[in-house]
Amino acid sequence: MLFNALAAKAPPSGGDYTKDGLIFCGKCNTPKQCRTVVDGEEIVYSVWCDCMKRADAEEKRQRKEIERAFKTAELRRLSMMGNKLSKCTFLGADKGGDNARSFKICERYVEKFPQMLKDNRGLLLFGGVGTGKTFAAACVANAMLEQNYSVVMTSLVTLIDGTDEIIRRMNEIDLLILDDLGAERSTDYGFERIYAVCDARYRSNKPVIYTSNLPLDAFKHAEDIRCARIYDRVLERCYPVEFRGVSRRKREAWRGFEEMNELLDV
């Protein structure tokens, strides 16, 4: 019989004992065998004791953790972010400076991302050069990757020069982050490629985060019709978040200059 065959596969191990004709685990004292009646015949069959159930659950948990780690690593590889950006987190943000509210909005965007994804809502991070827009966008990207969302962060200049296949793949990911909107070459080809990317994401109903050195007025009142077509798409789906203050890069450069001055001053 099938049940008897199963019972034979789970012989007693060290410490196991027999009670009422059934094998019990010597560790957890729960049965490794049960009996039932089929067509008037009593059948004994194997079952998992609590030890075996816990071991199986732990194996599944470890397998899931390994799969999650591999998936996160693969998503990071595909995200197109350099080593520097891949280390950006909200813990390293200056939350008491000029852009405290802006960073808070970005954090809230991460917290509310399931709703943002459903509603196709993105962000437009705009402001002067070096004020932390790209850093904030990278913080969002890394937080999303940690939650196993698919994210690609790249520059529009890079995407313009990419193949149609790369652009098509951009529509399959959960969140696309495009850096430096407005810094691209002002050619008909460049504008058409950017519009194609923005419009494709718009039609695929997937959110985008843009960063730009342009002021908000440049998006609202673009004189060039080619720009207006693009910026209308951006403003329709992206919440504008301004970044202010002194350039972080200039501040770091000046600090480095002062350190070198102290080291080299004779």
Image (spheres, helix red, strand yellow):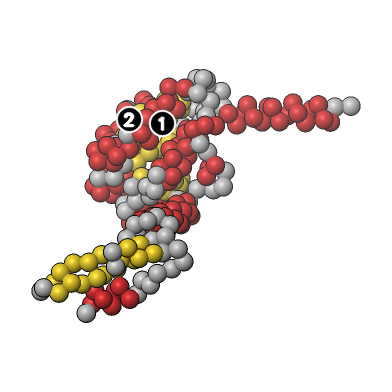
Farthest right residue?
A: 266
Proximity of marks 2 and 1: CB atoms separated by less than 8 Å = no
Q: Amino acid at mark 2?
A: Tyr
Which quarter of the figure has residue 140?
top left
Could you tell me which residue is drawn at 32 percent across and 30 percent down?
239
Q: In this rendered view, identify the residue nearer to me: 35 or 76.
A: 35
Mark 1 falls on what kind of element?
Answer: helix
Which quarter of the figure has residue 53?
bottom left
Q: State the count of labels.
A: 2
Could you tell me which residue is drawn at 24 percent across and 71 percent down?
44
In front: label 2 or label 1: 1
**Residue 141 image point, x, y percent:** 43, 42
Taking the image as shown, residue 66 lies to the left or right of residue 45, namely right
Could you tell me which residue is drawn at 44 percent across and 40 percent down?
143
Q: Is residue 147 above or below residue 91?
A: below
Q: Is residue 71 above or below residue 240?
A: below
Q: Residue at label 2?
A: 239
Of the numbered discs 2 and 1, the one sitting upstream in the chain is 1
Taking the image as shown, residue 106 lies to the left or right of residue 253, namely left
Q: In this rendered view, identify the residue nearer to me: 40 or 86.
A: 40
Q: Residues within 10 Å of mark 1 (few under 14, many from 20)?
A: some
**Residue 39 image point, x, y percent:** 10, 74
Q: In this rendered view, identify the residue nearer to me: 62 or 151.
A: 62
Residue 77 visible in rendering = yes
**Residue 206 image point, x, y percent:** 29, 45
Q: Amino acid at mark 1?
A: Glu
Q: Residue at label 1?
A: 107
Q: Residues within 10 Å of mark 2 (few under 14, many from 20)?
A: some
Give the position of the C terminus as an image quadrant: top right
Q: Is residue 176 above or below residue 126?
A: below
Mark 2 falls on what kind of element?
Answer: strand
